[in-house]
Amino acid sequence: MTMRFALDVPNDVSKDTLNVKIKQKINGMIDDLINSLPAPAQLTADERRGIIARYSAVLEGNFIYWMTAALLAVKSEDARPILLDNLHEEVRDAHPDMLRRFTIAAHAFPTDADALAVNDELTRVRLFLGRLSGVQSVLTMAFFEGFIQRFMDYLASLAAAQGSTEMEYTDVHGVCDIAHTDGLFKALAAEMGINPLEDGKELYEGVYLLRNLIKRIVFNRVEAQAA
Ligand SMILES: [Fe+2]
């Protein structure tokens, strides 16, 4: 079968190899983001509060919405239960409530200025996911899950520096859950098999938009636009 993805891999590459290459690229992007985080001790209290507030402004109201968008986008029957499982846990354990408690305890509940600081990048991700492109949407959520898990130690250290001890959100999300992350890559492989991305489309389009949003959360500076 001819590969229908605009990637720099030969046409005869196996699906497994392709999946490994995609996973490596996603993990590399996450590594770069994590390595670029400013040391909490070098930030002012206001800068620390801002990162928590912008993170919360994006995550609380959008994570479940975006996972739902990915669920609506996929055509593969094998991908659906993986996304549903994820949503089930989010709703059953009230993860938005957990995040809100974390944010309030760190005295970082988002203001209108915090919400508006991320507005442009957030809107781009929303409109992108609204196109309901199965493969691209699942890959975007795999990147999101992977990033969140790696970001938790840092987020917890920001909150601790703000005097908080409420860490249920970061404890729950920072657990290295191989099965969870692998699940989304399995969903990606299943979706690629039956609903491949059209020729000429950028596989990482949503990932790049989400990466810009994450950079805005962390840095809130114009250079976040550069990538
Ligand atoms: Fe969650």
Image (cartoon, rainbow, N blue to C red):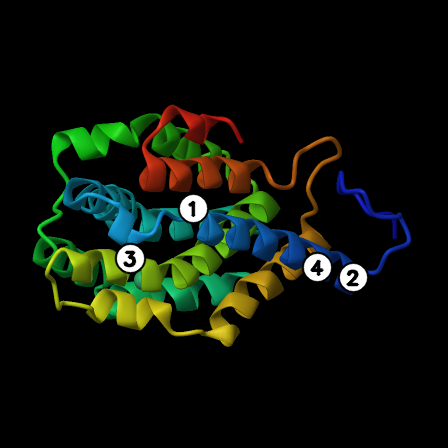
Q: Is residue 86 visible?
A: yes
- For mark 2, give the secondary structure: helix
Residue position marked by numbered label 1 in the rendering: 69
Q: Residue at x 28, y 53 (%)?
A: 40
Mark earlier in primary sequence (2, 1):
2
Which numbered circle lies on residue 19?
4
Q: Residues within 10 Å of mark 3 (few under 14, many from 20)?
A: many
- C-alpha separation, residue under disc 4 versus residue under disc 2: 5 Å
Q: Residues within 10 Å of mark 4 (few under 14, many from 20)?
A: some
Which tag, 1 or 3, sits closer to the chain's start? 1
Tell me the tag on residue 34: none
What residue lies at 45% left-to-right and 35% top-to-bottom? 212
Compute the Cα span from label 1 to label 3: 26 Å
Give left or right: position of 201 versus 11.
Answer: left
In this picture, is 73 found above or below 121?
below
Of helix, strand and loop, which one carries label 4?
helix
Q: Amino acid at mark 4?
A: Asn
Q: Earlier in the sequence, mark 2 or mark 3?
A: 2
| Amino acid residing under circle 3 | Leu
Q: Position of residue 129 (x, y in %)?
A: 46, 38
Give SS at disc 3: helix
Q: Quadrant of residue 111?
A: top left
CB contact under 8 Å: marks 4 and 2: yes
